[in-house]
Amino acid sequence: MGTKALARVLGHYLRAMRESRGISPAAAGHHIRAHISKISRMETAHVSLKQRDVDELLSLYGVPETERTEIAELVKRSALPEWWHPYGEVVPDWLQQLIGLERDAHIIRTYETQFVPGLLQTPAYARAVVRSGHRLAPDQDIDRRVELRLERQRRMAEPGAPVLWAIVDEGVLHRPVGGRDVMRDQLIHLLTMLRQPGVRLQVASYEASAAATPGAPVTYLRFAQGFLPDVVYLEHMTSAVYLDRLEDLDKYRAALDELSALSATPAASRAMLEDALLRYA
């Protein structure tokens, strides 16, 4: 998990712990001999987390020792440099948290209406998608953005990587992004990825997505540490929104559950991919 992303998740956790115990920011600040503003900065990831401060707060909040040990390890990791730092010139601020979160999630659920999910794209398909969103960008920038996407994919193939559970709208299979040859190779790649143990892919038929949909593309991340909050990522053309409020999470999780129940099974989805591939033969 990237440092900024991890700091945000830990900050949310600290706030949730404090509020669940009915402790005010002023009281928490007094406990660690700091101004109330420091608690706010810690909880909103506007200041780096110090192990001693976190330890004292967890003690105040009555967090169990086993959980405190895991948190201590996460605090240490939050001080490590971001792996994607060399790509900083093509990583907008609003995308940084997602890149930091996705590799260390336990499961990533995603629903796409327009394109194949980025973590399942071939290089040629990824280039076509990136180019469509950055039509005036120089080739060097396009190359770097594609390289970054492929590196994210590579890290998702490492041991301990999360399960990727993707639902794609049926229209994605029939939209020839990059041309017929690119789309044919992309469909073949999806059929190959279906055989990977860490990938679950479903196709949402037109009827399924008409009956149940989150309303827009969405990525839902859940972490193995049960005390860390889930995160919903909603991307727009020039920005993104991250949601972690329980009521928001419940709504998006329920929407994805309903859509998954109505979508084709992985086996039936394979058949739909094979049928679509015939169109590009």
Image (cartoon, helix red, strand yellow):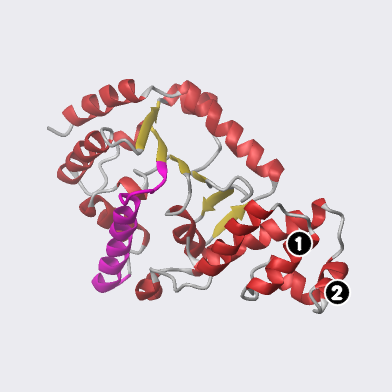
Q: Please count the marks in the image.
A: 2
In which quadrant will I find the C terminus? top left
Report which quarter residue 172 is drawn in.
top left
Question: What's the amino acid at mark 2?
Answer: His
Report which quarter residue 139 is drawn in.
bottom left
Residue pointed to by mark 1: 59
- The crowd level at tag 2 (other Cα within 10 Å; few <14, some 14-19, many 20+) is few
Mark toward the viewer: 2 or 1: 1
Identify the mark at residue 30; answer none if there is no mark. Answer: 2
Please name the residue shown 38% across and 48% down the image: 160
Image vertical order of residue 218 relative to residue 92, above or below: above
240 displayed left or right of 135 = right
Looking at this view, is 29 or 143 the one in front?
29
Please name the residue shown 46% across and 53% down the image: 104
20 displayed left or right of 137 = right
62 displayed left or right of 101 = right
269 displayed left or right of 227 = left
- The crowd level at tag 1 (other Cα within 10 Å; few <14, some 14-19, many 20+) is few
State the residue lying farthest toward the front. Answer: 65
Magenta stretch, residue numbers: 137-163
Type of secondary structure dominating the magenta stretch: helix
Specify whether residue 142 is painted magenta: yes
**Of helix, strand and loop, which one carries label 1?**
helix
Looking at this view, is 77 or 68 the one in front?
68
